[in-house]
Structure formats: C-alpha cells, structure tokens
Image: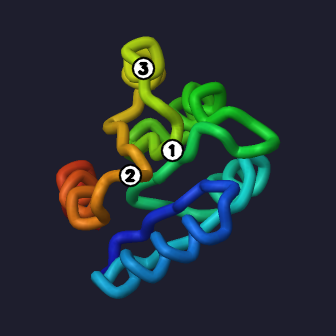
Amino acid sequence: MAKHLLVVDDEAPTRELLGLFFRARGFAVTAASSGAEGRALLRQGVYDLLILDIELGDANGLDLLPEIRSACPAMPVIIFTGLQTTDVMLQRAREAGAAGFLSKTQPLDSMLEIINQNLPQGR
C-alpha cells in the first residue's frame, strides 16, 4: 500500500510540484492550502507523514504543531519553509515535536531521502 503524505502549504505551485514529485515515486498525496483545511483533513483521514509549511496565511505551522502532535502523536511532521531558518526557529520546531526541518530551496531528491527516513515502517 502506498504511503500517504499530507502536504499543507498555502502556495499552489509548491503543492502541485510536491504532489507530482511524490506521486511519481509511488506515494499517495493529499494537499491542503491552509491551516484550517489541513486540520480538517487530519480529522478525516490517516496519513503516514505531514509536510507542513510555516507561513500558511491563516495560521503559523509552528503554532499548529502542538495541536497536530496531540491529535496524531505517531505521525511524523516535517516542517517545510522558504523562510530564512534561525536557531530559534529550529529549536521551536524540535520542541514542538517536528521530526525534521526542510528548506524549500533543498533539492527534491534530498527531500525524498529525509521523508523516507522519517516514514513509519509497515501499515
């Protein structure tokens, strides 16, 4: 069974690119364009991993992370951002339970490697 990723990002081109990239590699991908839509999808479905942007328009991904970790404690969450990362941001993400942190400028192949490292086995 294909691993199911949830991508929450307010930028349509980013959602489309990640969807195409991961589907071509055998993943099932569901995308949300806002924090509210991401929350609703998490309540409705089961995902193997969440790719979460920080700046979502209606929410801050780092602010949503504790709620997500509480609702889905076994699901790895990878923070994905185009923002300049700081030590404070990385520490906040780790403390809130992020499994990893990716920059939107990273090559997709390195992103795939990090996603695969964090996916739960089985299911």
Residue 31, horizontal then vertical, whole percent: 61, 67
* Residue at horizontal 59 percent and vertical 64 percent from the top: 45
In the image, residue 120 sits, relative to residue 18, either above or below, namely above
Residue 35, horizontal then vertical, whole percent: 72, 46
Q: Residues within 10 Å of mark 1 (few under 14, many from 20)?
A: few
Q: Earlier in the sequence, mark 1 or mark 2?
A: 1
For the residues bearing labels 1 and 2, Cβ distance under 8 angstroms: yes
In the image, residue 39 sits, relative to residue 48, either above or below, namely above
> According to the image, what is the colour scheme of the structure?
rainbow
Q: Earlier in the sequence, mark 3 or mark 2?
A: 3
Give the CA distance from mark 3 to mark 2: 15 Å
Q: How many marks?
A: 3
- Label 3 sits on what residue type? Thr
Query: Of 78 and 86, which appears nearest the observer?
Result: 86
Residue under label 1:
82
* Residue at horizontal 23 percent and vertical 52 percent from the top: 114
Say which quadrant the N terminus sits in.
bottom left
Residue 51, horizontal then vertical, whole percent: 47, 52
In the image, residue 44 sits, relative to residue 90, either above or below, namely below
Give the CA distance from mark 1 to mark 3: 12 Å
* Residue at horizontal 40 percent and vertical 32 percent from the top: 98
